[in-house]
Image: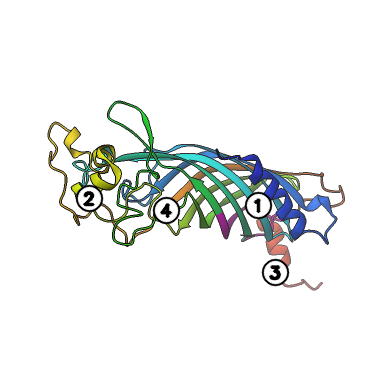
Amino acid sequence: MINPGKYVKALTSAFLLLCIQETHSQNFFATVFAGSSNYTGDLQEKPFTLTQSHPAFGVGLLYELNPHMFIRGDFTFGKISAADKYSAKNKVRNLSFYSTLYEYSLCFEYTLLDVYRYKATPFVYTGIGLFDFNPYTKSKDGNDVLLAELNTEGQGFYDGRKPYKLRQFSIPVAGGLQWNFNADKRLNIVVGYRKTFTDYIDDVSTTYVDEDLLRTNRGQKVVDLAYRGDELSNGVQTYPAGGTQRGNPKSKDLYYFVGMSFHIRIQPHRKERRMYYETSKRRRARVDCPKFY
């Protein structure tokens, strides 16, 4: 059973270590994220789509190094799913999956413009993440089935294929637009991709294992779930020959979050620090030549 609370503890510990020599709590922001989660892989080949997406939420801490640079730690959770029935290419395969996602990430963020001089600024961030996933599917009779323990592609007994781990590293790459309401409150619109190092988020990666071999090692239930085209009235009823392509191992799965986050300073900024938003008049005043009388 995954315990999200341990990620929050890890997040707090990481920031205490990073900022152990810094005592100015005014530089910390609490963050809240709300949006959607989705993935790209063997069952969802579009690089970006809002179809089949699910709600996602997150909390975090952000430490302001200066008006352009920040260190951020986030805990985000959501759900991803996909099904061949929505695909024009692989309908006859008839596979599907769904999974929860729990992610902890530590990143460096950079805003293009000074957050105290401009009301809006683009931003980007990247870093390292750790995520848990657990792909399930619905059996023909409607029961939830955990796919990772079935070894549908012969993991553990065929062609050197090893069982995949349900905890993996990722590389977050994100960007968006930030609105600065005042020195203490900010709103972000963000799109964040996660590069992963696994092709099994959806339990599909490479080729079909020979039907008899799979049945001998894992049973008829696994054979029934490894290929499900025979469940369709117009599908191919015969299990594909061993070695037939089931997925694309050359392309790793990725997932992404899209939404809005709100940042609020944990301790309000001292009043003498005022926002100084740029206007066209002020910008001209800074660059115009002095006048002589």
Disc 1 and disc 2 in contact, CB within 8 angstroms = no
Q: CA distance from mark 1 to mark 4?
A: 27 Å
Q: Would residue 83 be seen by someone viewing this image from the given angle?
A: no
Question: Residue at horizontal 21%, vertical 47%?
Answer: 89
**What amino acid is labelled 1 in the image?**
Gly
Q: Nearer the viewer, mark 1 or mark 4?
A: 4
Look at the image and tell me in which quarter the N terminus lies: top right
* Magenta range: 112-129
- At label 2, counting other C-alpha atoms closer than 10 Å, the crowd grade (few under 14, some 14-19, many 20 or more) is some
Residue that label 3 marks: 287
Residue carrying label 1: 73
What whole-number distance in Å separates the C-alpha atoms at marks 2 and 4?
20 Å
Mark nearer the N terminus (1 vs 4)? 1
- Closer to the eye: label 2 or 4: 2
Q: CA distance from mark 1 to mark 2?
A: 46 Å
Under circle 1, the secondary element is: strand
Work out how far the residue at label 1 is from the one at label 3, CA to CA, in angstroms.
39 Å
Residue denoted by label 2: 213
Judged by depth in the image, the label closer to the viewer, 1 or 3, is 1
Q: Which residue is mark 4?
A: 164
**Left or right of residue 184: residue 238:** left
Q: Are marks 1 and 3 in contact (CB under 8 Å)?
A: no
Report the amino acid beneath label 2: Leu
Q: Earlier in the sequence, mark 2 or mark 4?
A: 4
Taking depth in this image into account, of 242 and 232 the one nearest to the observer is: 242
Secondary structure, mark 2, is helix
- Look at 65% across and 52% down and name the residue there: 73
